[in-house]
Amino acid sequence: MQLSEKIWSNENLVKTLKDGGVVVMPTDTIYGIVGLAQNEPTVNRIYKIRKRNPQKPCVILIGDISELEKFSIILSEEQKNKLKEYWFTPSEGGVRPTSIILDCSDDRFLYLHRGARSLAFRLPLLQGLRNLLIKTGPLIAPSANLEALPLSKTIFEAKEYFGNSVDLYIDGGKLVGQASKVIELYQDGSASILRE
């Protein structure tokens, strides 16, 4: 995906997110409808706007692996080694964006894990997006479409879904990326692939 790294350095974008706003913007895969993961009203607002199934947790984008601790997640050495492999080691054809599901039994995050007692995280490879995440903190980032309807490939398609119900749209042109790979990672370092 050829996105200008500058797209995420927009000061208005940073301010809107830090103030608890909801934004449609390009992620490292497709357009997402994003907001602060640690702001429960923002998270609930995204579920409502998107008409998302209340039982389904959302992927959380993080700017650094250390941010997992904000969600009471303590990694085993085996998990740390696996995460390096999934998030930092290029394979043939580059690194595919990969969301990792980790156990999260802390009831403070019930509004995020929705009773599943696990959360999915992704550390984007794109430096511009990572810089944004360092400034704002972790963001939930479900795809920018209404539940069970086609993904938004352009900002215009996203506006047809959401209109004035979000606070800011960031146009990254036409995006034809694919959703991330999804892997569940266990304490012993073993893993199950849930979506290729």
Image (cartoon, grey):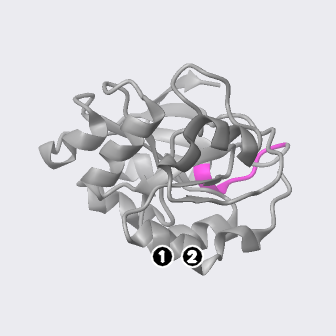
Q: Nearer the viewer, residue 119 or 24?
A: 24
Residues at circles 1 and 2 in contact by the CB criterion of under 8 Å: yes
Q: Is residue 57 left or right of residue 131?
A: left
Image location of residue 50, percent across then percent down: 47, 35
User: What residue is rendered at 68% in x and 70% in y?
Assistant: 128
Up-down: is 82 above or below 123? above
- Residue 111 highlighted magenta (yes or no): no
Q: Does residue 111 appear left or right of residue 129 in this picture?
A: left
Magenta-drawn stretch contains 90: yes
Q: Position of residue 119 (x, y in %)?
A: 36, 40
Please, what is the three-letter code of the amino acid marked with disc 1?
A: Lys
Q: Which residue appears at 38% of the width and 53% of the height?
A: 77
**Residue 25 position (above or below residue 48):** below
Q: Is residue 91 left or right of residue 122?
A: right
> Which residue is identified by label 2?
12
Q: Residue 25 shows which numbered tag? A: none
Residue sitting at x 31%, y 24%:
55
Q: Mark 1 = which residue?
A: 15
| Magenta-colored span | 87-92
Residue 93, position as x, y percentages in the image: 85, 43
Query: Left or right: where does residue 76 sit relative to residue 138?
Result: left
Instruction: Residue type at mark 2: give it.
Output: Asn
Q: Is residue 195 visible to us here?
A: yes
> What is the number of callouts on the image?
2
In what quadrant of the picture does the C terminus appear? top right
Toward the top, the furthest residue is: 148
Q: Decide whether the magenta segment is chiefly helix, strand or loop.
A: loop
Toward the viewer: 44 or 97? 44
Label 1 environment density (alpha carbons within 10 Å; few <14, some 14–19, many ≥20):
few
What's the distance in space between the residues labelled 1 and 2, CA to CA?
Answer: 5 Å
Q: Residue furthest bottom?
A: 11
Q: Secondary structure at mark 2?
A: helix
